[in-house]
Image: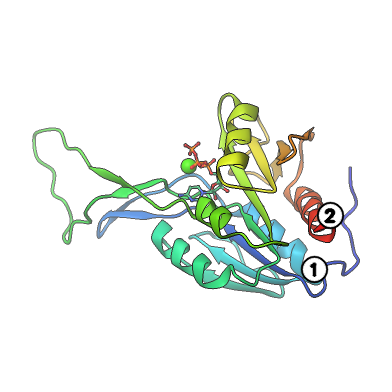
């Protein structure tokens, strides 16, 4: 167990965090989303601000209060998150993408509520931009880029692939099949994999303690570059 760091060791650093789910409208009353509560990202934003960083939180819809000292920008769709991140990533020292982004959106959004009929009904989905991949392509020297991976199988292999494909410094992989891990609760069980291939497993812990571990690792990488 790790005690919450109390020092303002991130003073002068700019941290960009994304959190929560995104929502993709089908019609004016329905949407596609996921189970993300936003708790992990909000914990990171809270701890980064408490440690002295200037924090911008780009958030999908959540029921969480804005952490103290954090500037929060609300979005709904993946495209909105993409635009908001693109407008704000450049001078960030550390970028942590904990949002559970919808990979697809309905190709068209019906203007009026879709009425049911007697036959089956299909929704054509189209790919959303991969925000983190784009950030990896634009990454400047000295910028630390952290991703999350939500997996239900082949966790290490899948997460490693994401580190390479998205040019990340490290990834925080959640095993969604484990009790006490993932979207909903106040705890998480993760494995952190960095770009050098180091793999570190962590026991179940409070999301705020994990937030500090993630910030510690990001800070170490930042200081080395
Ligand atoms: N991510 C993103 N934009 C997307 C999809 C994902 O920025 N359109 C980010 C997430 O915020 C997360 C990381 O990429 O930090 C990994 O997300 P995940 O869903 O686990 O991976 P994907 O690359 O989308 O692959 P898949 O869902 O097929 O496993
Ligand atoms: Ca995905």
Badge 2 element: helix
Please state the horizontal and vertical placement of residue 95, each as a whole percent of the image.
65, 60
Q: Residue furthest front?
A: 141
Q: Which mark is residue 204?
A: none
Tell me if residue 104 can be seen: yes
* Labels 2 and 1: the sequence-earlier one: 1
In the rendered view, tell whether residue 121 sits above or below residue 222. Answer: above
Say which of 112 and 193 sits in front. 193
- Which residue has dot 1 on it? 50
- Which residue has dot 2 on it? 220
Which residue corresponds to the image point at 56% horizontal and 24% vertical from the top-left?
153
Tell me if residue 77 can be seen: no
Please state the horizontal and vertical placement of residue 58, each as a whole percent of the image.
55, 65
Please state the horizontal and vertical placement of residue 150, each as a whole percent of the image.
57, 38
Which residue corresponds to the image point at 46% horizontal and 45% vertical from the top-left?
34
Please state the horizontal and vertical placement of residue 124, each as a whole percent of the image.
23, 42
On the picture, is 179 further left or further right than 74? Answer: right
């Amino acid at each position: 167990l790790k005690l919450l760091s109390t020092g303002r060791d991130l003073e002068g650093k700019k941290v960009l965090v994304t959190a929560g789910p995104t929502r993709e409208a089908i019609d004016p009353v329905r949407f596609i989303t996921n189970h993300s509560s936003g708790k992990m990202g909000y914990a990171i934003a809270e701890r980064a601000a408490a440690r002295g960083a200037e924090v911008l939180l780009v958030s999908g819809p959540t029921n969480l209060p804005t952490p103290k000292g954090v500037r929060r920008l609300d979005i709904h769709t993946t495209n909105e998150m993409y635009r908001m991140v693109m407008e704000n990533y450049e001078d960030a020292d550390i970028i942590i993408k904990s949002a559970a982004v919808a990979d697809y959106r309905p190709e068209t959004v019906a203007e009026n509520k879709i009425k049911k009929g007697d036959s089956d009904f299909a929704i054509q989905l189209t790919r959303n931009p991969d925000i983190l991949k784009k950030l990896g392509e634009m990454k400047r020297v000295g910028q630390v880029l952290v991703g999350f991976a939500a997996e239900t199988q082949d966790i290490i292999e899948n997460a490693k692939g994401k580190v390479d494909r998205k040019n990340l410094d490290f990834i925080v992989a959640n095993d969604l099949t484990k009790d006490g891990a993932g979207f909903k609760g106040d705890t998480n069980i993760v494995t952190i994999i960095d770009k050098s291939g180091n793999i570190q497993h962590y026991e179940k812990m409070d999301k705020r303690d994990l937030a500090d571990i993630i910030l510690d690792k990001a800070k170490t990488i930042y200081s080395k570059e």
